[in-house]
Image: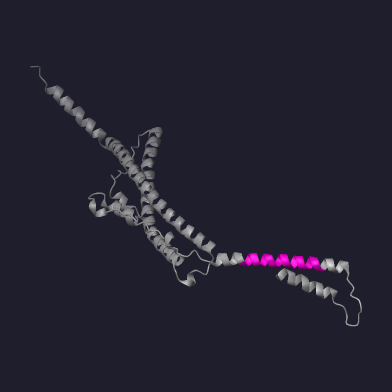
C-alpha cells in the first residue's frame, strides 16, 4: 500500500502540467529516473524496517535470569590447630609466610657450611653444589608456600567481586536490563567463566601444596646427608684418634687365655 502511494505521488508530480497548458507532456527519461528513485526509496524503507525489528528483538531481555545463577565455591583452608609440629607452616599456607619463618620452623636445621681448609678444589665444588641444592629448595618452598597463602586471600576478594557482578547481571530491576539480550548473554557467559577459573585456581593451589610437601621431604633427606658429612669432617679426627688409642690399649693389655 505504501509503495503504491509513493509511486502514484511521483507519477502525479511528473505528469502535472501548468494550468494554461492544453496537453500533458511526458518525458520518458525523467519517468525512468523517477521510477528508480522510488525503487531505491522503497528498498531503503524496507532496510530501515528490518533494522527496527532487529533492534526491538535485541532490546528484549532474556526474562528470567535465575537459570544462570550458580552457587559460589567455598574456599578451603587448612585446620592448623589439628597438627602439633607442622602447625606453623600449615598456618602460613593459609595466610602467607613472607619471611619463611614458619617454613624454617618445621624443617630440619641446616648446619653452617664450615668446609675444612684442606679439602681439594673438586671436593669443595661438589659440596657447594649439594649445599646449594638445599638452599634453592628452601627458597622455592618458602616462596611457593607464601604464594599459596596469598592466593587464598585473593580468592576471597575475587569471590566478593564475582558476587557483585552476579547480582548486577541477574537483578530483575528494569534499570539493570537496559542492555540488549546479547550483552546479557555475554555477561552470563563471562560469569560462568569466572566461576570455572576460580575453581581451577583452587585446584592448582592444592597441587602446588602437594609438590611443596614432596620437595620438603626430599630437602630433609639432603639436609641429613649433608649434616652427617659436616659432623664427620668436624669430629672425625678426634673420633679416629680415640679409636686408635682404644685399640692400642686393648692390644697392650690383651693376654692369651
Determine which quarter of the picture holds residue 37. bottom right
Is 62 situated left or right of 110 in this image?
right
Q: Position of residue 28 (x, y in %)?
A: 87, 67
Q: Position of residue 228 (x, y in %)?
A: 28, 37
Extent of the magenta region: 34-52
* Residue 234 vs residue 206, the one in the foreground: 206
Residue 51 to residue 82: above or below: below
Is 8 situated left or right of 83 in this image?
right
Asked if the magenta segment contains residue 256, the reply would be no
User: Can residue 98 be spotted in the picture?
Assistant: no
Is 56 situated left or right of 192 in this image?
right
Is 133 situated left or right of 107 in this image?
right
Q: How would you classify the magenta stretch by its main secondary structure?
A: helix
Q: Position of residue 92 (x, y in %)?
A: 32, 54
* Residue 117 vs residue 74, the one in the foreground: 74
Which quarter of the figure is the N terminus placed in? bottom right
Q: How is the image coloured?
A: one colour
Say which residue appears at 49% left-offset and 61% top-offset: 187
Residue 171 to residue 135: above or below: below
Residue 1 to residue 150: above or below: below
* Residue 181 vs residue 84, the one in the foreground: 181
Say which residue appears at 48% left-offset and 72% top-offset: 174
Say which residue appears at 91% left-offset and 76% top-offset: 23
Q: Position of residue 51 (x, y in %)?
A: 63, 65
Say which residue appears at 75% left-offset and 71% top-offset: 6
Which quarter of the figure is the C terminus placed in? top left
Amino acid at each position: 500500500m505504501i509503495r503504491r502511494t509513493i509511486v502514484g505521488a511521483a507519477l502525479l508530480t511528473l505528469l502535472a502540467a501548468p494550468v494554461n497548458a492544453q496537453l500533458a507532456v511526458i518525458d520518458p527519461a525523467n519517468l525512468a529516473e523517477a521510477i528508480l528513485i522510488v525503487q531505491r526509496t522503497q528498498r531503503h524503507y524496507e532496510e530501515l524496517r528490518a533494522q527496527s525489528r532487529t533492534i526491538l528483538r535485541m532490546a528484549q531481555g532474556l526474562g528470567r535470569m535465575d537459570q544462570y545463577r550458580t552457587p559460589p565455591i567455598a574456599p578451603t583452608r587448612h585446620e592448623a590447630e589439628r597438627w602439633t609440629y607442622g602447625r606453623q607452616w600449615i598456618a602460613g599456607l593459609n595466610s602467607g609466610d613472607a619471611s619463611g619463618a614458619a617454613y624454617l620452623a618445621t624443617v630440619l636445621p641446616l648446619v653452617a657450611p664450615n668446609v675444612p681448609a684442606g679439602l681439594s678444589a673438586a671436593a669443595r665444588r661438589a659440596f657447594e653444589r649439594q649445599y646449594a641444592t638445599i638452599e634453592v629448595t628452601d627458597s622455592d618452598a618458602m616462596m611457593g608456600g607464601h604464594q599459596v597463602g596469598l592466593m587464598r586471600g585473593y580468592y576471597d576478594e575475587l569471590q566478593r567481586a564475582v558476587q557483585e557482578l552476579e547480582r548486577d547481571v541477574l537483578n530483575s530491576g528494569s534499570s539493570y536490563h537496559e542492555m540488549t539480550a546479547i550483552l546479557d548473554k555475554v555477561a552470563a557467559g563471562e560469569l560462568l567463566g569466572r566461576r570455572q577459573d576460580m575453581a581451577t585456581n583452587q585446584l592448582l593451589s592444592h597441587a602446588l601444596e602437594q609438590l611443596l610437601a614432596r620437595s620438603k621431604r626430599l630437602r630433609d633427606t639432603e639436609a641429613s646427608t649433608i649434616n652427617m658429612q659436616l659432623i664427620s669432617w668436624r669430629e672425625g679426627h678426634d673420633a679416629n684418634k680415640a679409636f686408635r688409642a682404644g685399640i692400642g690399649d686393648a692390644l697392650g693389655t690383651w693376654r692369651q687365655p
